[in-house]
Amino acid sequence: MSLPQNLQPDEASPYWLNKGDNAWQLTAATLVGLQSVPGLVILYGSIVKKKWAVNSAFMALYAFAAVLVCWVGWGYRMSFGDKFVHFLGMPNVSLDAQYLIEQAFLGYLPNATMIYFQFVFAAITLILVAGALLGRMNFLAWMLFVPLWLTFSYTITAYSIWCPDGWLSKLGIIDYSGGYVIHLSSGVAGFTAAYWVGPRTTRDRERFPPNNILLMLAGAGLLWMGWTGFNGGDPYTVSTDASLAVLNTHVCTATSLLTWLMLDIIFFGKPSVIGATQGMITGLVCITPAAGVVQGWAAILMGMMSGSIPWYTMMVLHKKIWLLKQVDDTMAVFHTHAVAGSLGGILTGLFAVPKLNRLFYLVTNWQHYIGLFYGLQTGRTTAGFKQLGIQLLGIVFVVCLNITTTSLICWLIKLVIPLRLAEDELQTGDDAIHGEEAYALWGDGEKYESNKLNSVFEEFPPSTKGGEVQMA
């Protein structure tokens, strides 16, 4: 029996290529890309004080572009290429057409698709790091930080955990879609970088109201829906496990949002929109390392814990622990990503189902991927404790690596350029840094000053009253 004409292999569609898998992988990658651009660009630009809207949004947009150039230049092969050492691949470019159309190291996909898919994950990681630094980091220092951190931190974590030759991958760590590689890394790195950069101005720390909560919700919505590709794309195939991962992702996220919301109502008396958004994010982060390898009831439990434990660390412990009070983490990425990512990794070590791991990994030795609770249930207690130990070891490795590399990178940049903006720039914000401002219509008694920078429009005609523009 011959295949239908549209499934016949040819030069453009070799025998190893699965067209359905390739189509979904490109779609999933684009969904993840939309989480960053425009998702986090909108969220960052709207959740900050008005004077920081442009700078915050542009930090995200710059990182997305810079990561892509570095990724195809050397980053991808360092993360997933030929082994250099146990925790890093050999640096090499990923631009040769012959290499790009060859089969990737996993799945029935070409290298070009895999490079694109892994790029959007690397990009969002740097953008999440930026969340801790909004409102005071020197933009030129950020331009240096992005390629350096990608090269000397992200690639090491990605290779160690996700590459089949990585040392933690060989030990059997379970990180379905980036609870360690992306979220724990970005949370720890962001917090560490925030320590080195220093705090916002006292005035901004005391009062930092969002300039547009409705736009913030739009960005949050793109982030949530984009997670369908984030977790649904990681089996690298259109499988039943991909479907399970997508559903578990949304179930956990909804539960986490509702849990955080109820805690806000009980303890603060008001249903906070920003709080609900934080609960949404912690749910997305917590389920990420476990999405396709846990039961639906486990996703509910994970949502309840991701909506309550990070809430407690942010609302209660943050005010009691000296170090947390000293570091100005603008978007609280330590709580929403480091704490929630660690929580997800530990819960994966408890709830991971061996048969679901078989569907995900598709390897013959799938039995060693077993959560502690299933180990106790089946009499494989030692294997369950071993899996939990590996999950904890992964947390220790990622935390130590990111504290060290991020500190060294910040120290090196500081030798060349200040990490923090000058005081006059901190007082003014966007206009002092970029010569541009987010809103053309002003309140707060401010005057409108026309700006010709990057504009084809002429200046407004001279105003007729006290130098202020007259509005119809």
Image (cartoon, helix red, strand yellow):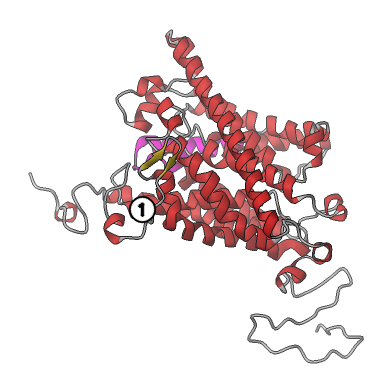
Q: Position of residue 260 (x, y in %)?
A: 70, 36
Mark 1 belongs to which amino acid? Answer: Thr
Q: Is residue 174 magenta?
A: no
The quadrant of the image that shows the N terminus is: top left
Secondary structure beneath dot 1 equals: helix
The residue sitting at the right extreme is 466
- Looking at the image, residue 432 lies above or below residue 419: below
Quadrant in the picture for residue 239: top left
Identify the magenta region. Answer: 232-256
Q: Position of residue 110 (x, y in %)?
A: 30, 51
Residue pictured at 84% horizontal, 55% vertical: 201
The residue beneath circle 1 is: 113
Relative side of 416 to 289, left or right: right
Residue pictured at 76% horizontal, 56% vertical: 210
Quadrant in the picture for residue 170: top left
Q: Position of residue 70 (x, y in %)?
A: 48, 57
Front residue of 253/408: it is 408
- Looking at the image, residue 359 lies above or below residue 279: above
